[in-house]
Structure formats: structure tokens, C-alpha cells
Image (spheres, grey):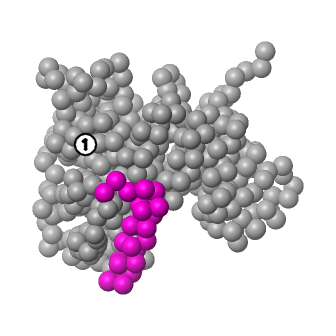
């Protein structure tokens, strides 16, 4: 009898989450990679294809896809490109689960297509729910599809809620490390460099997410996402700073009990949990040693200095297309900061300005969401 192997596709296999997903595949013998995708990093993508031998590879940039086809002439893999290629990857009949490890709103269309095709989603793409949660969650329910969070904080909450009734939840407590600038005031942030902002104290992540952690935008996006994932009100989500990233998040129940998920900061844990849910597999790696762990401390987030969190909550409260404006403006501003075109604090000013400039649309369609994204990008490009 042939051994059962779960078939997966990875959207964004060359980024931080994508490469760690493939680490999980390497460590387990019963996952089969049917498809991989990248934006433009065809050097790493070629290595991955030669190792995992998927049937399909999607490259967003057409010219890079042409180069990859030429390199892979000796292999039985089809190379596709553009949004059409990502959509083809998302709906492959052979796959059971799509890992959305791609960064940005480019992940929305493939995620919707995969849900419509009945695929479970291992969700690492925050933008999908931040901007289109009102479309995604009802569709997943209609299609009987599981949305399995890969973000460490959302995975922690998901694990704490296992076997619990949602009506018994009183509050979600999302933890934050505070990033590399925890304790600093606004004046001290005026001259921080790209290198300073990329020095995260605990986690190894992609550049964009690391900058988002430094601004606390990342925590704001997580609050916005948690609202949709767990069907709770914004007032029932609290952010607490836990500097060592030992507690990944917590749930407080109606009777006052608090459940927390603890562990070392290793993204392979939530990735593996999502891929094998509800089973837990052995995972190689460091364990918490409670004999040497002297204390776990908490702080209030400094929302006056780090405006990413309050701006995100404001965008989420306003709803409609405003979360898209928040997210898209931040995406463009972070790219400009990484290219040394703007200062660190310009990120906050740019997000606020884009939100104030925007005329909100209620209950937007996918096209209206994508229009709002373009509007935010254009405003940022014209202003900075």
C-alpha cells in the first residue's frame, strides 16, 4: 500500500517563511511539494526546484520566468508567470493546502482562488485578511475550507483556542517584543538607519516584516488580522509587550482563566502545526529551559512613540477601504525607507497622510480594494 503524502503548494517559497516551510518538508517524509513560486529570485527557486521536483513553478516577473525555463530545460517542470501563473498554482487539482508565504496584497487573488477551489490555507500573508477579511472569511466558511494561521501570534491564539468554545472567550492578548527600538522616544528615532531597524532582538524575518516590527505596524496588522480570524471585536484584543518573545500570545476566558502558548522563537513550529493540524509532530530545535528562565516581564506598548499600532486600530475601526490604505501606504513607505529615500519617522507621517487623503468606500469589492491600493501607492509616490 502506497504511503499517504500530503501535497502542498508554496506561494513565495524563496522568502523567510517559504524557505522555513521547505525546512519543515525536509524534516518530514510525508509532505510532497507540487508547486513553488517566487517574485524574481530564480537562483534560489532553481535550487528548490531541483531539490523538491515540483510539477509547477510560478515566477511573477515574466523576464525571469523566461530565464528559469531555459535553465530548467533538463527537468520535467512547467514554468508559468505573472498573476495568471500564481492563480494556476493556487488551484492545482493535486494539492490539498496552499502556504501563502508571499508578502503584500499580491497574495489576495491567489488565496481567494485557492479557497474557491476547496484548498485549505496555511496563512502567513497578513494583507489578505487585513484588507479583504470581509470577503475571505465568509468564503472560507461557505467552501468548508480551513484558514490555518502561520503567524506565531495567531498560531498561539489558535492553539490556545483548541477545544474551546468561541463564546467563552473574553479577550485576546497579542504579545509584542517591542522591536529593536523598545524604550526609545520619538526624538531618538529621527536619525535611525536601515541597519538599526533591521536588528530585531529575537526573530529572523524578511526585511519588510522586520521594519514593520520596528514601527509596531506589524503588531497593528496582527490586531487587524486577529479580528477576522477569530471573529472578535477590536475592544477585545489587547497588545502587551513581552520583550523576550517567550509567550507568543494568550487568550483570556470569561471565567478569568488565561491560556498562553510558550516556546522559543522559531517560525518552523507554527508552520509545521498548520501543515499537520490537528496533529503535533516532533520538531528539532531548542526547548525552553524553565530552570534557567528567571522571569517573564510585560510592558504597555508605547503608542505615542510607535504610531503604527494606533494608526492600524484607527484604520480597522473605520473599516471599508481604510485598512487597505493603511497597509498599502505602509508597504510603499517601507520600500522607500529600505532604499534610503525617506527617514524612519516618515513612515508614520506617510500612513497618516494617506489615510486622511482617502475617501473611504464601505464593504469594498476586490476591485475596489485593489483600486484603493493603487491610490495609496500613487499618493505616497507623489508626496515622498
Q: Secondary structure at mark 1?
A: strand
Residue 380 is covered by the magenta coloring: yes
Q: Does residue 321 appear anywhere in the picture? A: yes
Q: Is residue 352 left or right of residue 202?
A: left
Sort mark 1 into few (<14), some (14-19) or many (20+) by Cα contacts within 10 Å: many
Residue 207 is covered by the magenta coloring: no
Q: Please state which of residues 248 and 264 is positioned toward the viewer in this rendering.
A: 248
Picture layout, residue 327 above or below residue 112: below
Q: Position of residue 317 (x, y in %)?
A: 21, 53
| Residue positioned most to the top | 1
Q: Please state which of residues 333 and 261 is positioned toward the viewer in this rendering.
A: 333
Task: Look at 38% across and 57% down and name the residue there.
Answer: 364
Question: Does the magenta stretch mainly form a helix, a strand or a loop?
Answer: helix
Task: Look at 22% across and 27% down and name the residue there.
Answer: 169
Q: Please state which of residues 227 and 60 is positioned toward the viewer in this rendering.
A: 227
Q: Is residue 76 left or right of residue 121?
A: right
**Image quadrant occupied by the C terminus:** bottom left
Q: Quadrant of residue 235?
A: top left
Q: Does residue 201 appear anywhere in the picture? A: no
Picture layout, residue 85 above or below residue 241: below
Q: Position of residue 68 (x, y in %)?
A: 75, 63
Q: Is residue 23 left or right of residue 268?
A: right
Q: Which residue is mark 1?
A: 175
Task: Look at 14% across and 73% down and name the residue there.
Answer: 187
**What count of labels does the image hold?**
1
Q: Position of residue 222 (x, y in %)?
A: 32, 48
Q: Which residues are magenta?
A: 362-384
Task: Look at 42% across and 62% down and name the residue there.
Answer: 368
Q: Is residue 258 left or right of residue 10?
A: left
Q: Position of residue 341 (x, y in %)?
A: 37, 81
Q: Quadrant of residue 80?
A: bottom right
**Image quadrant occupied by the N terminus:** top right
Amino acid at each position: 500500500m502506497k504511503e499517504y503524502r500530503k501535497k502542498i503548494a508554496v506561494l513565495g517559497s524563496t522568502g523567510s517563511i517559504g524557505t522555513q516551510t521547505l525546512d519543515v518538508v525536509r524534516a518530514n517524509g510525508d509532505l510532497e511539494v507540487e508547486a513553488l513560486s517566487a517574485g524574481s529570485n530564480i537562483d534560489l527557486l532553481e535550487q528548490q526546484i531541483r531539490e523538491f521536483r515540483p510539477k509547477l513553478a510560478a515566477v511573477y516577473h515574466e523576464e525571469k520566468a523566461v530565464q528559469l525555463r531555459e535553465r530548467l530545460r533538463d527537468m520535467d517542470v512547467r514554468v508559468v508567470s505573472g498573476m495568471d501563473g500564481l492563480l494556476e498554482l493556487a488551484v492545482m487539482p493535486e494539492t490539498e493546502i496552499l502556504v501563502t508565504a508571499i508578502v503584500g496584497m499580491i497574495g489576495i487573488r491567489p488565496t481567494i482562488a485557492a479557497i474557491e477551489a476547496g484548498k485549505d490555507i496555511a496563512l502567513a500573508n497578513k494583507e489578505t485578511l487585513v484588507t479583504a477579511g470581509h470577503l475571505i472569511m465568509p468564503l472560507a466558511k461557505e467552501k468548508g475550507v480551513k484558514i490555518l494561521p502561520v503567524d506565531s501570534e495567531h498560531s498561539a491564539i489558535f492553539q490556545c483556542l483548541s477545544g474551546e468554545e468561541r463564546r467563552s472567550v473574553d479577550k485576546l492578548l497579542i504579545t509584542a517584543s517591542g522591536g529593536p527600538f523598545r524604550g526609545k522616544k520619538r526624538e531618538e528615532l529621527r536619525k535611525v538607519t536601515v541597519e538599526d531597524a533591521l536588528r530585531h532582538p529575537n526573530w529572523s524575518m524578511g526585511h519588510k516584516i522586520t521594519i514593520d516590527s520596528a514601527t509596531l505596524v506589524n503588531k497593528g496588522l496582527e490586531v487587524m488580522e486577529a479580528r477576522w480570524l477569530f471573529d472578535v471585536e477590536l475592544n477585545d484584543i489587547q497588545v502587551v509587550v513581552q520583550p523576550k518573545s517567550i509567550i507568543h500570545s494568550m487568550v483570556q476566558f470569561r471565567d478569568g482563566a488565561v491560556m498562553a502558548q510558550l516556546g522559543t522563537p522559531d517560525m518552523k513550529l507554527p508552520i509545521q502545526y498548520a501543515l499537520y493540524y490537528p496533529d503535533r509532530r516532533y520538531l528539532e530545535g531548542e526547548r525552553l529551559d524553565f530552570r534557567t528562565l528567571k522571569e517573564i516581564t510585560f510592558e504597555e506598548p508605547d503608542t505615542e512613540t510607535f504610531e503604527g499600532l494606533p494608526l492600524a486600530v484607527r484604520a480597522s475601526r473605520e473599516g471599508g477601504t481604510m485598512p487597505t490604505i493603511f497597509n498599502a501606504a505602509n508597504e510603499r513607505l517601507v520600500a522607500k525607507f529600505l532604499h534610503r529615500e525617506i527617514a524612519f519617522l516618515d513612515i508614520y507621517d506617510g500612513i497618516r497622510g494617506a489615510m486622511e487623503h482617502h475617501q473611504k468606500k464601505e464593504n469594498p469589492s476586490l476591485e475596489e480594494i485593489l483600486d484603493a491600493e493603487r491610490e495609496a501607492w500613487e499618493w505616497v509616490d507623489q508626496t515622498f
